[in-house]
């Protein structure tokens, strides 16, 4: 498998990783990171938990950093799959995107590994999320681009290039991950849903919703 700098890791998000041994490796790494953090987790510990030799792990991922990147991208892929499963495709477009916003906010406040690592290992984690964070931002932007394109294909939205908007939204989410202290009511799903719905109506230039 490619190292963390390889664009091939993005394919793990887009297509999934059908290789069970690789899944075992990433499961073992995730368990170890939750128990010890990234810095104190060795490749030997990942090998012990996954039942895959260190030599094989190095051949697949190149370095421990490659394993860290692969775990982060797999968890992002899983979350995007959850987002898609939780959206009602028959709902108005602003409602669909508002539900995505609610799910993202919930994950930001509940994801145990991210919260633990940002609090306990910021000097190691922040570079992975900032200067080396583009693959995760791109994954989120790709998901939003595809979601908006589907809404256009179904006639819910006028045609436009959704990629710039999708990247801006992904970067806003990324900012909330890095700086969770905010005036936004991220612990109130109803408030997030209402604010996001109004914001998306404005961003997508939708007409005001009429009340029956």
Image (cartoon, grey):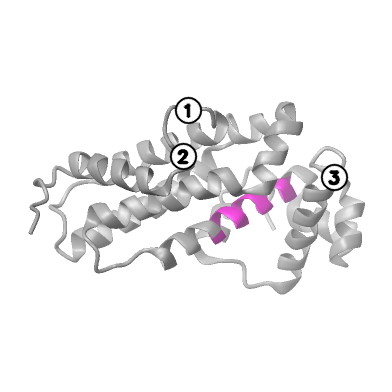
Residue receiving disc 3:
36
> What percent of the width, then of the height, locates residue 211?
9, 54
Q: Which residue is mark 2?
A: 186
* Residue 129 in sight from this viewpoint: yes
Viewed as shown, does residue 209 lie left or right of 112? left
The answer to if 67 sits in the magenta stretch is yes
| The C terminus, quarter of image | bottom left
**Residue 11 shows in the view:** no
Q: Is residue 30 magenta?
A: no
Residue at the (25%, 39%) spot, across then down? 199
Q: Name the quadrant of the N terminus.
A: bottom right
Q: Report which residue position mark 1 lands on.
A: 182
Where residue 65 sits: x, y (%)? Answer: 74, 42
Q: CA distance from mark 1 to mark 2?
A: 8 Å
Q: Are dots 1 and 2 in contact, CB under 8 Å? A: yes
Q: Nearer the viewer, residue 203 or 45?
A: 203
Q: Residue at x 61, y 67 (%)?
A: 17
Task: Give the magenta range.
Answer: 66-78
Does dot 3 land on a helix, a strand or a loop? Answer: helix
Residue visible at 32% across and 67% down? 88
Q: Nearer the viewer, mark 3 or mark 1?
A: 1
Query: How many numbered circles does the render carry?
Result: 3
Q: Nearer the viewer, residue 70 or 190?
A: 190
The answer to whether the residues at label 3 and label 2 have Cβ atoms under 8 Å apart is no
- Kindly report the secondary structure that dominates the magenta region of the rendered protein: helix
Q: Quadrant of residue 132?
A: top right
């Amino acid at each position: 498998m490619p190292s963390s700098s390889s664009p091939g890791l993005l394919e793990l998000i887009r297509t999934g990783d059908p290789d069970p041994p690789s899944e075992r490796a990433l499961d073992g790494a995730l368990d170890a990171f939750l128990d010890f953090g990234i810095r104190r987790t060795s490749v030997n510990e990942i090998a012990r938990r996954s039942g895959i030799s260190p030599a094989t792990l190095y051949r697949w991922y190149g370095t421990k950093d490659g394993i860290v990147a692969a775990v982060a991208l797999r968890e992002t892929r899983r979350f995007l799959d959850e987002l898609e499963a939780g959206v009602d495709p028959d709902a108005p477009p602003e409602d669909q995107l508002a539900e995505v916003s609610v799910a993202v906010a919930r994950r930001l406040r509940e994801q145990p590994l991210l919260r633990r690592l940002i609090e306990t290992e910021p000097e190691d984690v922040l570079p992975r999320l900032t200067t080396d964070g583009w693959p995760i931002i791109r994954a989120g932007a790709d998901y939003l681009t595809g979601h908006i394109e589907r809404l256009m294909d179904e006639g819910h939205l006028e045609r436009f290039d959704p990629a710039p908007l999708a990247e801006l939204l992904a970067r806003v989410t990324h900012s909330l991950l890095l700086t969770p202290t905010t005036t936004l009511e991220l612990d109130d799903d109803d408030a997030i849903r209402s604010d996001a719905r109004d914001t998306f109506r404005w961003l997508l230039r939708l007409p005001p919703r009429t009340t029956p």
